[in-house]
Image: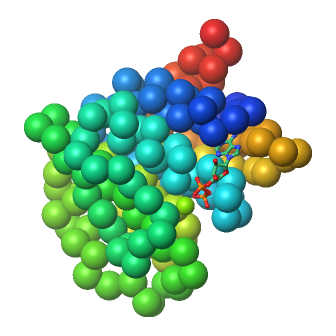
Amino acid sequence: MKNGMITSSSREQTLALAAQFAHRLKGGEIVFLRGPIGAGKTVFVKGIAQSLGVKGSPTSASFSLLKAYRNKQYCLFHIDLFRLEEGEVFNLGFEEMLEDEKAIILAEWPDPVARMLPQDRLEMNFVLKEGNEREIYLSSYGRVSDALLEYLCKTVKK
Ligand SMILES: Nc1ncnc2c1ncn2[C@@H]1O[C@H](COP(=O)(O)OP(=O)(O)O)[C@@H](O)[C@H]1O
Ligand SMILES: [Mg+2]
């Protein structure tokens, strides 16, 4: 397990951070996005989608719990389980998603499904500070996510 913290001062900076992060994604990564409403979780997902060049733009105002955004190279799965609880979430199509080598899984409010997903995941906890300031606390739980965390922290320091 590794830990780290990065900061963002604007929506644009979070988008840029996400775009950088996307360069490092190959498929097979899982990211949990935590933090209150308006913290910037969906902005981060949008930045990744833009950078990967997948079709469509992830949004938060949606009743779909799982959405897929694809191109030839990647398949970005955006999960948003706001207000749901464990036991309320069934048949999201996880089997297919987890077998897909190209799958990059980004999950907001992931608790209802956390136990159905592999351990090795990067957790990003967005904390609201004054104005547009955000602190993003990172924790990783395995080989793949440890490397992602290191990359993200190094990229930001540059
Ligand atoms: N540093 C920042 N990073 C991301 N979003 C920011 C930042 N500062 C202000 N914002 C604004 O905060 C809101 C974040 O919304 P959103 O990403 O949908 O939040 P969440 O998905 O965490 O509920 C957007 O309106 C965005 O413009
Ligand atoms: Mg959101």
Above or below residue 95? Residue 56 is above
Q: Is residue 17 visible?
A: yes
How does the figure colour the protein chain or chains? Answer: rainbow
- Tally the marks: 0
* Residue sitting nearer the eye, 79 or 114: 79
Residue 115, picture quadrant = bottom left
Residue 96, picture quadrant = bottom left
Q: Is residue 104 left or right of residue 30?
A: left
Q: Is residue 105 visible?
A: no
User: Which residue occupies 67% across, 64% down?
Assistant: 37
Q: Is residue 47 left or right of residue 8?
A: left
* Residue sitting nearer the eye, 42 or 83: 42
Q: Is residue 84 left or right of residue 120?
A: right
* Residue sitting nearer the eye, 73 or 47: 47
Above or below residue 93? Residue 123 is above
Name the outermost residue toward the bottom.
Answer: 87
User: Which residue occupies 70% across, 63% down?
Assistant: 36
Image location (x, y in percent) of residue 120: 44, 48
Name the outermost residue toward the right.
Answer: 130
Name the outermost residue toward the top.
Answer: 158
- For the C terminus, give its image quadrant: top right
Image location (x, y in percent) of residue 47: 46, 38
Image location (x, y in percent) of residue 23: 37, 24
- For the N terminus, give its image quadrant: top right
User: Which residue occupies 32% across, 84% down?
Assistant: 90
* Residue sitting nearer the eye, 63 or 93: 63
Name the outermost residue toward the left.
Answer: 72
User: Which residue occupies 17% across, 51% down?
Assistant: 100
